[in-house]
Image: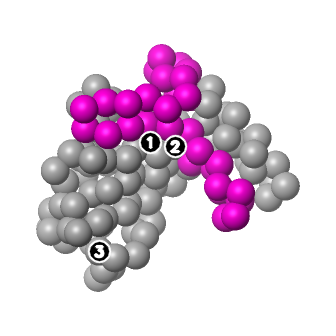
């Protein structure tokens, strides 16, 4: 389930990320494995949204969700072809009517490529 207008993304049946989600909320979930709220939290189980498979990461800042990062793993890309995953993510977002960076009252959604880390991801950044 997802509702981009409200910034809500259901990663699993029992884990909904959105504005106001806190690290304390995450600690109460079955996905909490003694991670700390300062480092990136990579969820171990793959996430399925609208029939696509993703790796999901959570970033918290001052105890509140700052960013949900999704990497679609429906297609395999070599390390050298990681920028092609960015184009693939662009296509996925375009299917939702999102081109470039889309701003909302709760934050933004964009497809990004980090050259330093050589990682492409779909990022929901919360205010």
Q: Is 57 on the left-hand or right-hand side of 28?
A: right
Range of the magenta residues? Answer: 92-121
The picture quadrant where one finds residue 6 is top left
Which label lies toward us, 2 or 1? 2
Disc 1 secondary structure class = strand
Along the line of sight, the residue nearer the viewer: 71 or 44: 71
Q: CA distance from mark 1 to mark 3?
A: 24 Å
Residue designated by label 2: 122
Residue designated by label 3: 37
Give the mark nearest the N terminus, 1 or 3: 3
Q: Is 5 on the left-hand or right-hand side of 39?
A: left
Which label lies toward us, 1 or 3? 3
Give the mark nearest the N terminus, 2 or 1: 1
Disc 3 secondary structure class = loop
The residue depicted at 54 percent of the width and 23 percent of the height is 99
Does residue 40 sit above or below 69 in this rendering? below
Residue designated by label 1: 48
The picture quadrant where one finds residue 59 is bottom left
Along the line of sight, the residue nearer the viewer: 101 or 26: 101
Residue 10 included in the magenta stretch of the image: no
The residue depicted at 22 percent of the width and 61 percent of the height is 64
Measured as percent of width and height from the top left, residue 30 is found at 23, 66
Does residue 19 sit above or below 59 in this rendering? above
């Amino acid at each position: 389930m997802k509702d981009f207008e409200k910034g809500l993304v259901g990663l699993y049946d029992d884990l909904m990320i959105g504005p106001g989600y806190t690290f304390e909320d995450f600690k109460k979930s079955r996905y909490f494995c003694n991670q700390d709220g300062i480092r990136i939290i990579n969820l171990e189980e793959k996430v399925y949204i609208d029939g696509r498979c993703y790796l999901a990461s959570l970033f918290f800042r001052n105890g509140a969700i700052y960013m949900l990062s999704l990497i679609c793993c429906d297609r395999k890309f070599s390390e050298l072809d990681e920028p092609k995953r960015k184009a693939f993510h662009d296509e996925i977002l375009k299917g939702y009517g999102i081109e470039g960076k889309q701003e909302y009252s709760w934050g933004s959604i964009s497809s990004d490529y980090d050259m330093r880390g050589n990682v492409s991801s779909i990022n929901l950044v919360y205010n």
